Image (tube, rainbow, N blue to C red):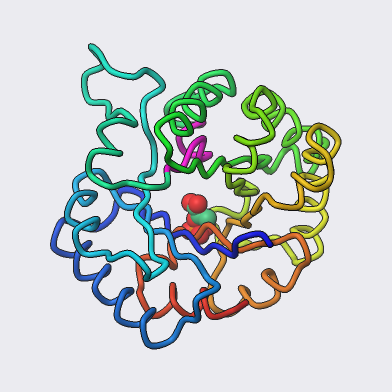
């Protein structure tokens, strides 16, 4: 059975103390309110990684994530952070190819393929983001756009490795806009993504890959989105900055 995952992407928010306070709140609420079937990921800024890893204990189903890594193993890349560095402080998940990184840092599908490889070879789990901009949704073919992102960044992986990868479908027009995809739109795209994986890797492998929805997901719409057959959880931006909202979303399965 595929994992149900709710991952919080804090982006460039929370100073050190604010971040640790948020983690403590999430941990306490999760202990009291969440069952064992939901996996939480906290994708915090780099400065929080080590301290959060010390706060989380095994068996709680709460995992530490990062929001990016560099595509080279090490070297003269001022300001960058490698997979090995993340691994050394206990990071377990890495968001790869978020639309903000694609847009503001010109990350390409080819570059993202290298990042995914490094994350997997470091035995961490990539959360690979894909999704179409508004122009493509309104005047193009959103499915083709997403299929191309997946083919160019993930299709070189072996079946074993693709099974270890989490995919997040995030329509760009829904990120941070308050505009959510309807559950029909989300299910359609998630099923199409699974079908595309199935054509390459077979139904059994595709059936094991968790596909998360991201884009203005909040407690009021999570239940409907998560009830879709091919939606296995969410990648949550704004609402992950509030422990109550984040946990309420995770309780929506
Ligand atoms: C995101 O940035 O991954 C995201 C889904 O943001 P928001 O929930 O704020 O739309």
Residue in front for this viewpoint, 241 or 96: 96
> Is residue 222 found left or right of 143 in the rendered image?
left
User: Does any portion of residue 176 appear in the rendered image?
Assistant: no
Q: x, y (%) of residue 252?
A: 59, 79
Quarter of the N terminus within the rendering? bottom right
Outermost left residue:
17
Report which quarter residue 188 is drawn in: bottom right
> Is residue 181 found left or right of 246 in the rendered image?
right
User: Which stretch appears magenta?
Assistant: 94-102
Vertical side of 92 occupied by 107: above or below:
above
Q: x, y (%) of residue 39?
A: 49, 65
Report which quarter residue 151 is drawn in: top right
Quarter of the C terminus within the rendering? bottom right
Residue in front for this viewpoint, 222 or 126: 126
Q: x, y (%) of residue 89?
A: 22, 44
Report which quarter residue 2 is drawn in: bottom right
**Residue at image location 42% in from the left, 41% down from the top:** 124
Outermost top residue:
76
**Residue at image location 24% in from the left, 38% down from the top:** 88
Number of callouts: 0
**Residue at image location 37% in from the left, 69% down from the top:** 59
Vertical side of 63 occupied by 165: above or below:
above
Q: x, y (%) of residue 56?
A: 27, 64
> Is residue 239 found left or right of 47 in the rendered image?
right
On whether residue 177 falls in the magenta region, the answer is no
């Amino acid at each position: 059975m595929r994992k149900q995952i709710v991952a919080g992407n804090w982006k460039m928010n929370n100073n050190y103390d604010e971040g640790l306070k948020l983690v403590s709140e999430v941990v306490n609420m999760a202990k009291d309110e969440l069952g064992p079937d939901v996996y939480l990921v906290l994708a915090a800024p780099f400065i929080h990684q080590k301290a959060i890893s010390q706060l989380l204990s095994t068996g709680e189903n709460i995992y530490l994530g990062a929001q990016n890594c560099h595509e080279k193993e090490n070297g003269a890349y001022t300001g960058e952070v490698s997979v090995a560095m993340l691994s050394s402080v206990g990071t377990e998940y890495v968001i790869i190819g978020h639309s903000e990184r694609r847009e503001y840092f010109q990350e390409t599908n080819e570059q993202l393929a290298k990042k995914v490889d490094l994350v997997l070879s470091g035995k961490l789990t990539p959360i690979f983001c894909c999704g179409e901009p508004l122009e493509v949704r309104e005047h193009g073919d959103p499915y083709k756009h997403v299929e191309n992102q997946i083919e160019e960044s993930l299709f070189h992986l072996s079946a074993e490795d693709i099974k270890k990868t989490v995919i997040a479908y995030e329509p760009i027009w829904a990120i941070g806009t308050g505009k959510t995809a309807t559950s029909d739109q989300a299910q359609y795209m998630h099923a199409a993504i699974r079908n595309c994986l199935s054509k390459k890797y077979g139904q059994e492998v595709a059936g094991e890959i968790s596909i998360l929805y991201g884009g203005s997901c909040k407690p009021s719409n999570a239940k409907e989105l998560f009830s879709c057959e091919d939606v296995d959880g969410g990648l949550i931006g704004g609402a992950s900055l509030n422990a109550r909202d984040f946990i309420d979303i995770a309780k929506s399965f």
